[in-house]
Image (cartoon, rainbow, N blue to C red):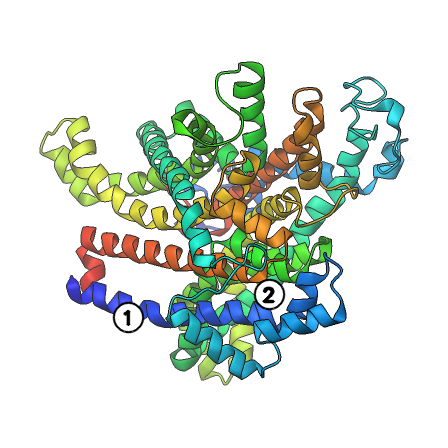
């Protein structure tokens, strides 16, 4: 097992190097001068642009810039925000807890709801319950989160007045944003749990369990579910990426502090060092989460480890 | 057994000719096209999408209003006979903007798909077929792109490209490339070992010919399914960018941008956000139903599953 984890960690290094390179390519090689782009809003003079170019090291050759870029990243130095002049890492660290809180709450909700509905659909396969659950989950996947957020704000904050529409602080402020994100993610989990459970239910060991005369309930809980959940672990990593992306929209709508809102503001302000820092940070987190789910997968299913 | 007796001879002797009607349903596997037609949900979804496309294109014929004309005296009128979906902050007819907005919202979604599918498929074909170094390079590239949540990659591209419909198409399209590369690579890997590929090689087909004329047509089903579902994703991602103010800019009518314009007036004029929200949700819902139906008909692994 340790060997497997070590191999996967080593495998992540070229990917992270690629991520750093891709971000560099997007930021530097695309048409347009970053310094001019960043100062375009403020109507910066030619001199100001030239100064910023020197400050950002844009006068150097691309290869030298790339070298500096990698060297700074290796020291976990993401530079400073153009606007606040504060370190990008500090800025991200300040906003991080709020996003983690939101993503975790949404994830828990999505897993709980998705698993329950998926089992319900699979057990009632072919009946109207199955059809209904599947229709709901497709609707959940299809509804844009920025609209479901608006609908829930309208219903629970404006009409019923039960929950605050925006802001942060305490559980009451977390319910609506987490609900919106969780519902959107639950659709995909429901579909996977159902498909996975249906596949397992037709396998020999389930037939054997039935043939032994076990109650259907025992067959389901003790034998089928355990195996059906193995592929489900793999989607949790992917859904985490979806949630991280979703926080961009949700934090903006609910005026919550967090990485997602920071990203949108950084783009609107054309604060490219901040944009670059956030993207690199999120990609790092996402890669590590996927690595962790892969390790969990391998732990649950020995066929992967030795395959 | 039945086929050993001439069919016409059987008919003359009064035997029933085995047709689709006489063979029990479970023994008869209809061809994909008929199975698709027999699916009422898929047909309904397809009709809805065609209706969205038709009404968007025919918007000037269907609506007497101008989607951009500002009319302060008509601000926030509730839905009525004259304004079926009400009016917005600037007194513009929401229904009209919805029709014109469909051109951009659906159009962007449909244009972004080939931008993702063509390079993605090509990369997947090369990686799966040539293997070794090519595969390692492509797989690395795919893993790097997959290290970004797709909307984040699109956001980053928008940050550098700037706002506007053309850049939304590019950003959403490029961020979809790795999905296709991964799918196609896997399909090619299993197709490569099939006897028909070896047969083509034996009779002297070139690599290009084997890839494009033999392997590609055989793995087209899953690609079409992914491309269909991808239209839904692209519409969602593109409208999210516009909703955040980073994509299509007001006053141009686009569903995501319309939602953003209306969300500040939720209490007084909920119809301004209800119409575009419902339009996105129903369109993407139909695309997903259609994609699922196509998967059931085209993807052999999903056939006869239950």
Structural distance between the alpha carbons of marks 2 and 1: 32 Å
**A44 relative to A105, above or below:** below
The local crowd at label 1, few if under 14, some if 14 to 19, many if 20 or more residues have their Cα within 10 Å, is: few
Q: Chain of mark 2?
A: B
The local crowd at label 2, few if under 14, some if 14 to 19, many if 20 or more residues have their Cα within 10 Å, is: some
Q: Nearer the viewer, mark 2 or mark 1?
A: 1
Residue appearing at x 23%, y 60% in the figure: A304
Left or right: A203 in relation to A170: left
Residue appearing at x 66%, y 40% in the figure: B256
Residue appearing at x 89%, y 29% in the figure: B71
Quadrant where the N terminus of chain A lies?
Answer: bottom left
Between A122 and A155, the residue placed more toward the observer is: A155
Between A227 and B241, the residue placed more toward the observer is: B241
Residue underneath mark 2? B118
Q: Chain of mark 1?
A: A
Q: Are marks 2 and 1 on the same chain?
A: no
Between B61 and A180, the residue placed more toward the observer is: A180
Q: Is residue A245 visible?
A: yes
The residue tagged with tag 1: helix, strand or loop? helix
Quadrant where the C terminus of chain A lies?
Answer: bottom left
Residue B274 drawn at (x, y percent): 66, 27
**A127 relative to B157, above or below:** above
Residue underneath mark 1? A10
Specify the quadrant of the image occupied by residue B257. top right
Tell me the number on the disc at residue B115: none
Residue A145 drawn at (x, y percent): 54, 36
Q: Are marks 2 and 1 in contact (CB under 8 Å)?
A: no
Q: Is residue B128 visible?
A: no
Residue A76 drawn at (x, y percent): 39, 66
């Amino acid at each position: 097992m340790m060997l497997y984890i070590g191999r996967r960690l080593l495998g992540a290094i070229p990917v992270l190097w690629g991520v750093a390179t891709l971000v560099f390519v997007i930021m530097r090689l695309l048409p347009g001068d970053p310094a001019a782009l960043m100062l375009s809003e403020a109507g910066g003079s030619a001199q100001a642009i030239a100064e910023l170019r020197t400050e950002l090291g844009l006068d150097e050759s691309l290869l030298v810039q790339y070298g500096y870029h990698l060297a700074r990243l290796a020291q976990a130095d993401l530079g400073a925000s153009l606007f606040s002049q504060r370190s990008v890492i500090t800025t991200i660290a300040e906003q991080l807890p709020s996003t983690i809180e939101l993503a975790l709450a949404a994830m828990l909700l999505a897993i709980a709801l998705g698993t329950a509905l998926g089992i319900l659909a699979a057990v009632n396969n072919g009946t109207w319950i199955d059809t209904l659950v599947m229709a709901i989950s497709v609707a959940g996947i299809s509804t844009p989160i920025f609209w479901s957020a608006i609908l829930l704000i309208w219903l629970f904050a404006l009409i019923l007045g039960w929950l605050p529409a925006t802001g942060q602080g305490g559980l009451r402020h977390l319910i609506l944003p987490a609900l919106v994100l969780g519902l959107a993610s639950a659709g995909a989990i429901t579909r996977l749990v159902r498909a996975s459970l249906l596949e397992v239910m037709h396998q020999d060991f389930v037939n054997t369990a039935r043939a032994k005369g076990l109650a259907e309930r025992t067959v389901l809980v003790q034998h089928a579910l355990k195996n059906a959940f193995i592929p489900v672990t793999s989607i949790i990593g992917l859904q985490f990426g979806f949630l991280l992306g979703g926080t961009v929209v949700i934090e903006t709508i609910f005026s919550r502090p967090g990485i997602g809102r920071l990203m949108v503001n950084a783009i609107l302000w054309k604060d490219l060092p901040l944009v670059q820092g956030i993207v690199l940070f999120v990609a790092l987190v996402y890669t590590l989460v996927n690595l962790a789910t892969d390790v969990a997968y391998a732990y649950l299913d020995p066929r992967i480890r030795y395959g | 057994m039945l086929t050993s007796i001439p069919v016409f001879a059987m008919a003359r002797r009064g035997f029933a000719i085995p047709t689709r009607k006489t063979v029990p349903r479970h023994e008869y596997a209809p061809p994909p096209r008929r199975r698709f037609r027999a699916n009422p949900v898929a047909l309904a979804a397809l009709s809805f999408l065609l209706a969205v496309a038709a009404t968007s294109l025919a918007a000037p014929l269907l609506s007497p209003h101008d989607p951009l004309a500002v009319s302060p005296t008509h601000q926030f009128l509730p839905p009525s006979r004259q304004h079926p979906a009400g009016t917005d902050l600037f007194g513009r007819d929401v229904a009209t903007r919805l029709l014109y907005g469909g051109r951009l919202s659906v159009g962007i979604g449909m244009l972004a798909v080939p931008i993702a599918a063509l390079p993605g498929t090509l990369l997947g074909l090369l990686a799966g077929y040539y293997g070794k170094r090519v595969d390692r390079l492509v797989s690395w590239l795919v893993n790097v792109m997959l290290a970004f949540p797709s909307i984040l990659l699109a956001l980053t591209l928008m940050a550098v490209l700037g706002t506007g419909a053309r850049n939304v198409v590019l950003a959403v399209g490029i961020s979809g490339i790795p999905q296709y590369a991964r799918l196609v690579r896997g399909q090619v890997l299993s197709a490569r070992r099939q006897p028909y590929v070896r047969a083509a090689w034996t009779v002297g087909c070139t690599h290009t010919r084997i890839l494009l004329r033999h392997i590609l047509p055989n793995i087209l089903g899953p690609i079409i399914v992914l491309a269909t579902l991808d239209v839904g994703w692209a519409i969602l991602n593109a409208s999210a960018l516009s909703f955040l103010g980073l994509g299509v800019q007001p006053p141009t009518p686009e569903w995501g941008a319309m939602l953003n314009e209306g969300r500040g007036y939720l209490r007084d004029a909920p119809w301004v956000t209800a119409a575009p929200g419902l339009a996105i949700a129903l369109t993407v819902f139909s695309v997903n139903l259609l994609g699922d139906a196509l998967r059931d008909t085209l993807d052999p692994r999903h056939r006869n599953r239950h």
